[in-house]
Amino acid sequence: MRSGVGNGWQIKHLTDRVIELEKSDVAYRKFTGSDGVVRVRAEPGMDRGLLIERALTQANRCDAELALRVAQDALPTGKAYADYRNQTRAFAQANNTGEESFAIGVKSVG
């Protein structure tokens, strides 16, 4: 049975010397090819509470790095933005009727 520890992370394996956290997330699968996994080994004399704290700290760092990757993937590059700008200008020119916008569709009398 797995136990959740926050932010979608679950304890997959826990002993006195090792803790393994796993996060089943689409973003992790997209950018790394598998679920998010954090494994921390205890140093001699380390208690279990400190071991879990270190694992959660590392899990938060992994989430922050993943958030940066997602943001970089979402932002357009300079070339993509320039292509979009040029395409919208071409569409605007193609759809230009030569009339003022308030007069389009208005029947003239006279």
Image (cartoon, rainbow, N blue to C red):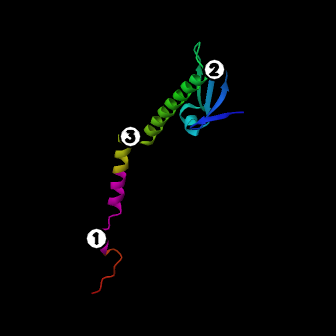
**CB of mark 3 within 8 Å of CB of mark 2?**
no
Quarter of image, res 29? top right
Quarter of image, res 45? top right
What separation in Å lies between label 3 and label 2 (alpha carbons)?
Answer: 42 Å
Q: The residue under label 3 is which amino acid type?
A: Thr
Residue mark closest to the camera, 3 vs 2:
2
Left or right of 43 on screen, residue 77: left
How crowded is the residue under tag 1: few (<14 C-alpha within 10 Å), some, or many (20+)? Answer: few
Q: The residue under label 2 is which amino acid type?
A: Val
What separation in Å lies between label 1 and label 3 (alpha carbons)?
Answer: 35 Å
Residue mark closest to the camera, 1 vs 3:
3
Q: The residue under label 1 is which amino acid type?
A: Glu
Give me the residue at 51% from left, 30% from top. 62
Instruction: Quickly name the residue at label 1.
Output: 100
Magenta residues, as a range?
Answer: 86-102
Q: Is residue 99 magenta?
A: yes
Seen as rendered, the residue at the extreme top is 44
- Helix, strand, or loop for circle 3? loop
- Helix, strand, or loop for circle 1? loop
Q: Position of residue 100 (x, y in %)?
A: 28, 70
Give me the residue at 69% from left, 33% from top. 2
Q: Position of residue 32 (x, y in %)?
A: 55, 31
Above or below, 45 relative to 30: above
Q: Is residue 101 magenta?
A: yes
Instruction: Quickly name the residue at label 2.
Output: 18
Give me the residue at 66% from left, 24% from top. 14
**CB of mark 1 within 8 Å of CB of mark 3?**
no
Instruction: Quickly name the residue at label 3.
Output: 77
Q: Earlier in the sequence, mark 2 or mark 1?
A: 2
Quadrant (top left/top right/bottom left/bottom right) for the N terminus: top right
Q: Earlier in the sequence, mark 3 or mark 2?
A: 2
